[in-house]
Image (cartoon, grey):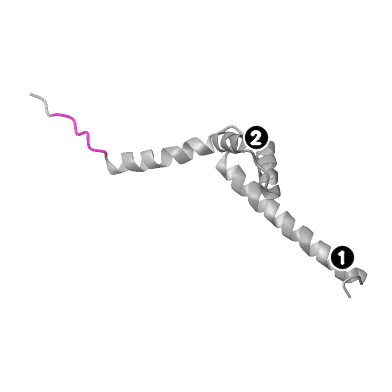
């Protein structure tokens, strides 16, 4: 008689299973242009729920993080430049 195979998950199997959703998300084929468009609409604050769901299923989360950080940095730089221009022009005095 042969012994029944051990069906309990091994630690390596559990780690591979836990990482597979992340790997699947990173392997999504959404373009970076689609990501920039989604981030832009999100900064503007107007999103349709159907478009949001579509973006969640298609866009690469690493692209979203990179585009979000870049957009936030650009926004801060533009605000600083605007404040410097207003203060330098004497309008704020």
State left or right for residue 20 relative to residue 86: left
Whether pointer 2 and pointer 1 mark residues with C-beta atoms closer than 8 Å, the reply is no
User: Residue lying farthest bottom?
Assistant: 93
Question: Which of the 4 image quarters holds residue 53?
Answer: top right
Please state the horizontal and vertical placement of residue 30, each as a whole percent of the image: 61, 34
Q: In front here: 1 or 82?
A: 82
Asked if residue 91 is among those painted magenta in the image, a careful observer would answer: no
Name the chief secondary structure element in magenta: loop
Residue at mark 2 = 31
Please state the horizontal and vertical placement of residue 44, each as a whole percent of the image: 71, 48
**Nearer mark to the viewer, of 2 and 1:** 1
Q: In front here: 35 or 46?
A: 46
Q: In front here: 51 or 82?
A: 51
User: Residue lying farthest left?
Assistant: 1
Q: Quadrant of the C terminus?
A: bottom right
- Residue 85 — which label? 1
Question: Which of the 4 image quarters holds residue 83?
Answer: bottom right
What segment is highlighted magenta in the picture? 4-9
All told, the count of numbered labels is 2
């Amino acid at each position: 008689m042969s012994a029944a195979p051990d069906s309990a998950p091994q630690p390596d199997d559990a780690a591979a299973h836990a990482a597979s959703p992340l790997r699947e998300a990173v392997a999504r084929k959404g373009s970076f242009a689609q990501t920039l468009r989604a981030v832009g609409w999100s900064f503007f604050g107007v999103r349709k729920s159907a478009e949001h769901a579509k973006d969640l299923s298609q866009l690469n989360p690493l692209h979203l993080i990179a585009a979000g950080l870049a957009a936030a940095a650009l926004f801060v730089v533009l605000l600083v430049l605007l404040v410097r221009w207003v203060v330098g022009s004497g309008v704020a005095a």
